Amino acid sequence: MTKLELKEFLDYKAEQYEKPVFLESDPIQIPHRFSRKEDIEISGFLMATIAWGNRVSILKSGEKLLEIMEHSPFDFIKNYKQSPDMLHPFVHRTFNAGDLDFFFRSLHEIYKSGNLEACFVDPQNSGNVKNRIIHFRNIFLTTDHEIRSAKHLSDPARNSAAKRLNMYLRWMIRPNTKGVDFGIWKTIKPSELNIPLDVHTSKYARQLGLLTRKQDDWKALDELMVNLREFDPEDPVKYDFALFGLGAFEKF
């Protein structure tokens, strides 16, 4: 395909898959149960954090999280006190009760004086999502935690593609024009966003000639986003739906 043909193809696929039916098997369905901004961003953050592995397992763990938070994430976080015994049954792959307790405590500290959105606003690095994620991560990790828990927050400073955090930012920032993403954060523009790069999206990006780097890291993400921003500089991450759909639903 020519570059124009490729753009038209990806535009078509993005339009095809960015629809409410997309929610039926996606972790984003959990925060869609809420209307309050804080409930959406807290439940969304936790779902993005555990969004690896089998989708059925992810959603099952998401339901358990909602039960623990008594289906009121913001109220739960505001009033949270460390209680490992209550969290003991929770585990999702390598994310265990101790990790969850740390995440709850860190969120509690964040909401005591601000909110999650503000943690991604780095006044010295506006317009740079990589530095926004690093800034957020530094804030989140100021709460006491076991060393092992830090691995659940990917670090772009170490060249991680930070798939789950980029996915979370997409959820919060892209407009809700198609009923999928939320668009509740206004301090970051959709044009800044990066797609959540994983083995599936990178595979199809390589097949389509959008990516040449072999490793799925931040350098690969930078390369891919240069090409996607040529197709749509204002909303480049809409192509996440195209690449994901080609893999998950069409086995392209």
Image (spheres, helix red, strand yellow):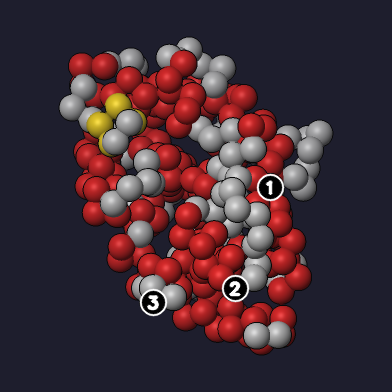
Identify the residue at the far right of this view: 124
Position of residue 107 in the picture relative to residue 94 (left or right): right
- Viewport quadrant of the N terminus: bottom right
Give the mark nearer the N terminus: 3 vs 1: 1
Find numbered disc 1 in the image and state the secondary structure of the residue it sits on.
helix
Mark before the other along the chain sequence, 2 or 3: 2
Crowding around mark 3 (Cα neighbors within 10 Å: few <14, some 14 to 19, many 20+) is few
Task: Return the x and y of residue 59 as percentages of the image width and height.
Answer: 27, 50
Residue at label 3?
A: 250
| Residues marked 1 and 2 touching at CB (< 8 Å) | no
Mark drawn on residue 219: 1
- Closer to the eye: label 2 or 3: 2
Residue drawn where x is 47% and y is 55% of the image: 199
- The front one of 34 and 160 is 160
Image point 75% across, 45% down: which residue? 128
Give the quadrant of residue 89.
top left
Q: CA distance from mark 2 to mark 3?
A: 15 Å
Question: Which amino acid is tagged 2?
Answer: Leu
Quarter of the figure with residue 140: top right
Percent x, y of residue 227: 72, 66
* Residue 192 image point, x, y percent: 71, 54
- Badge 1 amino acid: Lys
Is residue 180 visible to the viewer in this orientation of the structure? yes
Name the residue that disc number 2 marks: 208
The one nearer the camera, 71 or 27, is 27
Tag 2 secondary structure: loop
